[in-house]
Image (tube, helix red, strand yellow):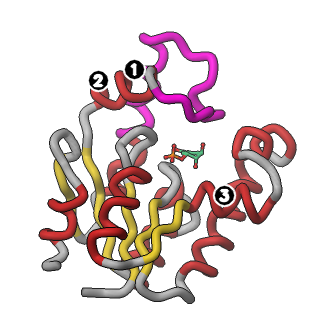
């Protein structure tokens, strides 16, 4: 098994929860990219978007990823947009094993409507606006997500399934 595992996928696809479970199961450290960016910047993700804008956030995502690529035995839950900017999917694919957790828009919508995490890109959207946004954004992002080494159906997925997929 390669020593860096990247979980990628749209907001609300369960990357953080699954990443934690997978890491525990295979004895790796777990890192949530968003959390690490927040700790490093001393600001929340919404705060970063307000103060510095998305472009700066995307640059910081790249910086954090480059740092994470120096670590071994780590499961990394990437931010939803990370693989789709600045060729981060290419870096992830070269530096580890990538897994795309795929979910249909209505399931993502349902999960995001009930999520307590504040996400600047979908803040203030009505239910129907959110579904439209997910559909459009996913269309734009899928070509990047689909470059992952593994694509798995997130509907019934558990941490153990991911471990099995990786042969552990
Ligand atoms: C984003 C997803 C978020 C976070 C930021 C931008 C995106 O991460 O990185 O709000 O562009 O899809 P999650 O996928 O963990 O929600």
Residue drawn at x 45%, y 60% as measured from the top left: 77
Q: Which residues, given as a range, are shown in magenta?
A: 115-139
User: Is 125 one of the magenta-colored residues?
Assistant: yes
Q: Quadrant of ligand 1?
A: top right
Q: What's the CA distance linking mark 3 and mark 1?
A: 24 Å
- Residue 108, by quadrant, is top left
Say left or right for 81 vs 111: right
Secondary structure state at the residue bearing disc 3: helix
Q: What's the CA distance linking mark 2 and mark 1?
A: 7 Å
| Cβ atoms under marks 2 and 1 closer than 8 Å | yes
* Image mark for residue 41: none
In the picture, the quarter occupied by the C terminus is bottom left
Q: Position of residue 5 (x, y in %)?
A: 36, 74
User: Is 10 one of the magenta-colored residues?
Assistant: no
Secondary structure state at the residue bearing disc 2: helix
Check disc 2: other Cα within 10 Å, few if <14, some if 14-19, many if 20+. some
Query: Which tag, 2 or 3, sits closer to the chain's start?
Result: 3
In the rendered image, which residue does mark 1 sit on? 131
Q: Is residue 12 visible?
A: yes
Query: Which tag, 2 or 1, sits closer to the chain's start?
Result: 2
In the rendered image, which residue does mark 2 sit on? 106
Say left or right for 145 vs 92: left
Residue drawn at x 40%, y 80% as measured from the top left: 4
Check disc 3: other Cα within 10 Å, few if <14, some if 14-19, many if 20+. some
Q: Position of residue 45 (x, y in %)?
A: 70, 45
Residue drawn at x 68%, y 73% as measured from the top left: 63
In the rendered image, which residue does mark 3 sit on? 58
- Note whether 30 is above or below 78 in the view shown: below
Q: Identify the residue at the far right of this view.
A: 51
Q: Nearer the viewer, residue 17 or 141?
A: 17
Q: Is residue 147 visible?
A: no
């Amino acid at each position: 098994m390669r020593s860096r595992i990247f979980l990628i996928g749209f907001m609300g696809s369960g990357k953080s929860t699954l990443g934690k479970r997978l890491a525990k199961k295979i004895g790796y450290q777990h890192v949530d990219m968003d959390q690490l960016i927040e700790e490093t910047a001393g600001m929340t993700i919404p705060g970063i978007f307000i103060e510095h804008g998305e472009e700066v956030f995307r640059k910081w995502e790249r910086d954090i990823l480059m740092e994470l690529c120096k670590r071994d035995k780590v499961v990394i839950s990437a931010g939803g947009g990370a693989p789709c900017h600045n060729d981060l999917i290419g870096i992830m694919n070269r530096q580890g094993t990538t897994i795309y957790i795929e979910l249909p828009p209505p399931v993502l919508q349902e999960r995001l409507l009930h999520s307590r995490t504040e996400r600047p890109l979908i803040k203030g959207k009505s239910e129907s606006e959110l579904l439209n946004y997910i559909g459009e954004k996913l269309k734009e992002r899928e070509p990047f997500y689909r470059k992952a080494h593994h694509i798995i159906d997130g509907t019934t997925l558990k941490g153990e399934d991911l471990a099995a997929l990786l042969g552990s």
